[in-house]
Image (spheres, grey):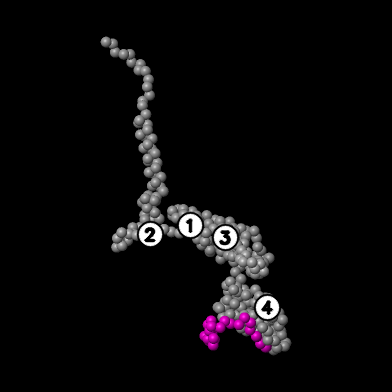
């Protein structure tokens, strides 16, 4: 694992330690009037499925509270800053940079002298508060199935899923039945349909009605192109081998529909017109074969 500052560790195959011993001495104006002890603080993993952000945030926040510097993280209002704010901010910046995996450096680099900015940037990188973030953990809870006989392991796994989901729920952004509906809907459709709503999933507060509208629009688009995809099978037929490899296969084009998604042989409109023509011709033939209606002539017979 490489370092962002250009230095290379002596053993590149060795992962960074899970905990680091940090010894920091606050400045003379710092809120902490004694030398900070050497706590064993956890190292923040890169964002992803194996992130340990929730535990890391809990431990580090408690440490900042213990050394009386957490006020730097609580507000950005200059009027509310304490006299020791500058030294306390430097302490937070130095601590954070020592207890994060180098993969996190790109998130905090723009805030190298802003402890609160670093703290918020790491939270946003590890906590996906978008609609897709909530839906992901709801689906993990809904589709998880116990494997084997270890019930304790399954309970622990489900608890971790719940913890990750609960971290995204706040009084301002509560979990609603609409979120569960969206998760169930997206879990019930083929994966190739999910792509049409991927941009919506990156936004916050997207309603199920918006997702449904996007799926219906995608259905209309596919039908208009004659490319209705079967839900039961997504396999495509291999192209037929051409008799002459020098002659490339002809492109499909329907002169009836003016589309390049099919040709006249597979055109639904052409087939419909042919069937209607045959039906009309059959009716005409049947009407000709019927005998003329019989009736007595009013003209008197000729005399001999």
Circle nearer the viewer, 3 or 2? 2
Question: Foreground: 3 or 171?
Answer: 3
Tell me the residue that label 4 is attached to.
59
- How far apart, in angstroms, are the residues tagged by discs 4 and 3? 35 Å
The quarter of the picture where residue 74 lies is bottom right
Magenta span: predominant SS is loop
- How far apart, in angstroms, are the residues tagged by discs 3 and 2? 32 Å
Residue at horizontal 28%, vertical 11%? 303
Q: Position of residue 257 (x, y in %)?
A: 39, 51
Mark positioned earlier in the residue sequence (2 or 4): 4
- Discs 4, 3 touching: Cβ within 8 Å: no
Mark positioned earlier in the residue sequence (3 or 2): 3
Question: Foreground: 118 or 52?
Answer: 52
User: What range of the chain is rendered magenta?
Assistant: 1-27
Mark 3, secondary structure of its residue: helix
Label 1 Cα crowd, 10 Å radius (few <14 / some 14-19 / many 20+): few
Tell me the residue that label 1 is attached to.
233
Mark 2, secondary structure of its residue: loop
Q: Is residue 133 on the magenta stretch?
A: no
Label for residue 239?
2
Tell me the residue that label 3 is attached to.
187
Mark positioned earlier in the residue sequence (3 or 1): 3
Q: Position of residue 60 (x, y in %)?
A: 67, 79
Circle nearer the viewer, 4 or 3? 3
Q: Is residue 11 on the magenta stretch?
A: yes
Label 4 Cα crowd, 10 Å radius (few <14 / some 14-19 / many 20+): some
- How far apart, in angstroms, are the residues tagged by discs 2 and 4? 59 Å
């Amino acid at each position: 694992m490489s370092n962002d500052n250009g230095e290379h560790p002596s053993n590149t195959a060795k992962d960074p330690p899970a905990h680091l011993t940090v010894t920091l001495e606050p400045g003379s104006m710092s809120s902490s009037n004694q030398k900070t002890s050497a706590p064993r603080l956890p190292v923040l993993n890169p964002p992803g499925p194996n992130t340990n952000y929730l535990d890391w945030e809990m431990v580090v926040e408690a440490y900042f509270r213990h050394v009386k510097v957490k006020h730097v993280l609580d507000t950005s209002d200059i009027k509310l800053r304490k006299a020791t704010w500058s030294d306390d901010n430097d302490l937070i910046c130095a601590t954070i940079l020592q207890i994060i995996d180098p993969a996190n450096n790109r998130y905090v680099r723009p805030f190298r002298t802003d402890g609160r900015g670093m703290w918020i940037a790491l939270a946003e990188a590890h906590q996906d508060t978008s609609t897709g973030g909530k839906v992901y953990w709801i689906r993990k809870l809904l589709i998880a199935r116990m494997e084997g006989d270890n019930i304790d392991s399954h309970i622990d796994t489900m608890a971790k899923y719940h913890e990750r989901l609960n971290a995204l729920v706040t009084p301002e952004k509560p979990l609603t039945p609409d979120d569960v509906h969206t998760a169930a809907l997206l879990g019930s459709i083929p994966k190739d349909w999910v792509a049409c709503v991927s941009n919506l999933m990156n936004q916050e507060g997207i309603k199920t009605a918006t997702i449904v509208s996007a799926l219906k629009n995608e259905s209309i688009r596919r039908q208009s192109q004659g490319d209705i995809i079967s839900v039961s099978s997504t396999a495509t037929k291999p192209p037929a081998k051409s008799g002459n490899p020098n002659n490339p296969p002809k492109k499909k084009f329907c002169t009836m529909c003016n589309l390049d998604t099919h040709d006249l042989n597979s055109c639904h409109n052409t087939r419909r017109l042919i069937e209607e023509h045959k039906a009309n011709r059959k009716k005409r033939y049947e009407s000709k074969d019927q005998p003329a209606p019989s009736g007595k002539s009013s003209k008197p017979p000729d005399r001999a």
